[in-house]
Image: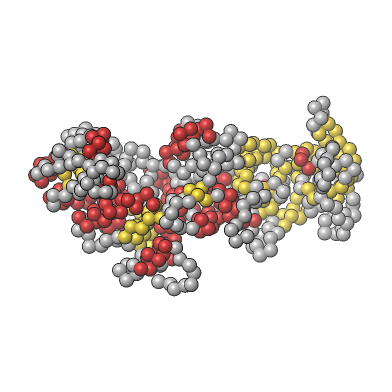
Amino acid sequence: MEETNVSRSFIEEFIEEDYRNYPVVKTRFPPEPNGYLHIGHVKAMWVDFSMAEKFGGTCNLRFDDTNPVKEDVEYVEAIKHDIKWMGFNWDKLCFGSDYFDTCYELAVKLIKKGVAYVCDLDKDQIREYRGTLTEPGVNSPYRDRSVEENLDLFERMKNGEFPDGARTLRAKIDMASPNINMRDPALYRILHRSHHHTGDKWCIYPMYDFAHPIQDALEGVTHSLCSLEYEAHRPLYNWVVEQCEFEHKPRQIEFARLNITNTVMSKRYLRMMVETGAVRGWDDPRMPTLCGMRRRGYPAAAIKDFLARAGVAKADSVVDSAMLEHCVRENLNVNAVRAMAVTDPVKLVIENWEEGREEDISIENLPVDGAEDKGSHTVPFGRELYIERDDFMVEPPKKFFRLKPEGEVRLKGAYIIKCTGWEQDEEGRVTLIRAEYDPESRSGECTRKVKGTIHWVPAKEAVPAEFRIYEPLFTESEIDTEHILEAIDPNSITVKHGFVEPFLKGAEPGVPYQFMRVGYFTADLDSTDESPVFNRTVGLKDSYKPANA
């Protein structure tokens, strides 16, 4: 174990305390394959893998597939891809269903020990018998069945003799326990469903609270790290380990879940939005899913940075979504290649530029101090260009330093131009701008300065492109989940059509670009060489102020 002076989280302190008992740290990341991972799951992933890394240990990937109702191989493969994309490597790939035979054998063992019984109460009756937080529960009328009868009924449950919900196997603990989770919890339920991994072998499935500690113990997990809602389940976790008589006893440690403003992190509601068509799928770039963030252009390193800044705490808290964008923006600032794109174009004609003449203008790919040298590329400069419509105003306000009648600006990397005229349609919309350039003002060769610099693309070689501009899916920091579909902001996506410079033809999804003066973008999965589509990852302006700023 490495010794450093860096402050440690409470989880690291617990692991250090356990060092003598567990000199080799082993954790596990146990997602349920019933949907795509969202940023909340990624926090658990980051905690599980990073804790193992910090202590020179290993982390297993174990799919919690004890409920076959909504689990699917599609989600298994997507989760594996997400973990690798985040830069983590698992030690062993396991499935909860790998342990179904052992779970059954251990359930039989508990029946023989007299600490488990088959109960005929239905779900509603079990809830009624359980009691409340202030009132103790009442024993099931089936609690005192003999070991022989319980063994017979449990085997018949396994053989498929009873319908769904007709019987459950329950632990015999204490119906008066102040912890409701210890009031004879269910260990097995009947479910006649085909399983994605085991097919039709089983029609009874272990409950999570029974299967999970067994799986941890069998895999030699030393620290079972999980979210805070499982704190009340810890006594049951320990009970299962003790009653199954495992020599190896994992330690469960709970941490607060990740909550972010303007974001919903519930698989149930995310699924609803997908299935109703409120979003374009699990990988919609507005979604908090990892595949959605990846499609939008969020770098894995920025997500890790965000999780590290948010920290690991014992108490629930809410993190400002602006912090995530801040981390993404900081990462892209030193990694995104600079290029030019015009999202709302108007044509500019330089009237004193010779017809047919072109010059190559050099654009440095990454002009940031300390950034990796990524060279430069050239953009052809000629008589006709496109500029942003907002960069010209016929009647500008004071301190408008972009192009205006008789005003001057520098075209990025090129020349200073002066507006000499413009054309408008019947509605007053500018359709063409005329200008003249100063031949002695080429960038890098001229000391004359003007207050404004604007970007451009060459009209002849410009590539038509679609730009998808994203805003938060929800405008409210706290979302009313009962009316989740109505809470979605209809203006959370805006589509624009403009042009990019020829350098960007064939841009690949995931490669980050800073479109100068516009924002950070990456090519979408819908993008083609002939019809590029770019997603805005984040804008250039950053409203978030770090605590140490």
Q: Is 442 rendered above or below residue 526?
A: below
Say which quarter of the image contains residue 166: top left
Q: Residue 253 in the image: x percent, y percent?
A: 36, 58
Residue at the farthest front position:
134
Residue drawn 25% across the image and 62% down it: 248
Which of 510 and 185 lies nearest the eye of the viewer? 185
Say which quarter of the image contains residue 89: bottom left
Residue drawn 37% across the image and 65% down it: 15
Please give left or right for residue 10 compared with residue 453 in the image. Answer: left
Which of 486 and 465 lies nearest the eye of the viewer? 486
**Can I make out residue 330 in this image?**
yes
Please give left or right for residue 102 compared with residue 197 in the image. Answer: left
Residue drawn 20% across the image and 40% down it: 138
Q: Quadrant of the C terminus?
A: bottom right
Scheme of colours in the image: secondary structure
Residue drawn 53% across the image and 58% down it: 309
Q: Quadrant of the N terminus?
A: bottom left
Q: Residue 106 in the image: x percent, y percent?
A: 19, 51
Say which quarter of the image contains residue 463: top right
**Can I make out residue 507 in this image?**
no
Q: Residue 375 in the image: x percent, y percent?
A: 69, 60
Q: Residue 80 in the image: x percent, y percent?
A: 42, 50
Which of 248 and 58 lies nearest the eye of the viewer? 248
Which of 491 and 547 lies nearest the eye of the viewer? 547
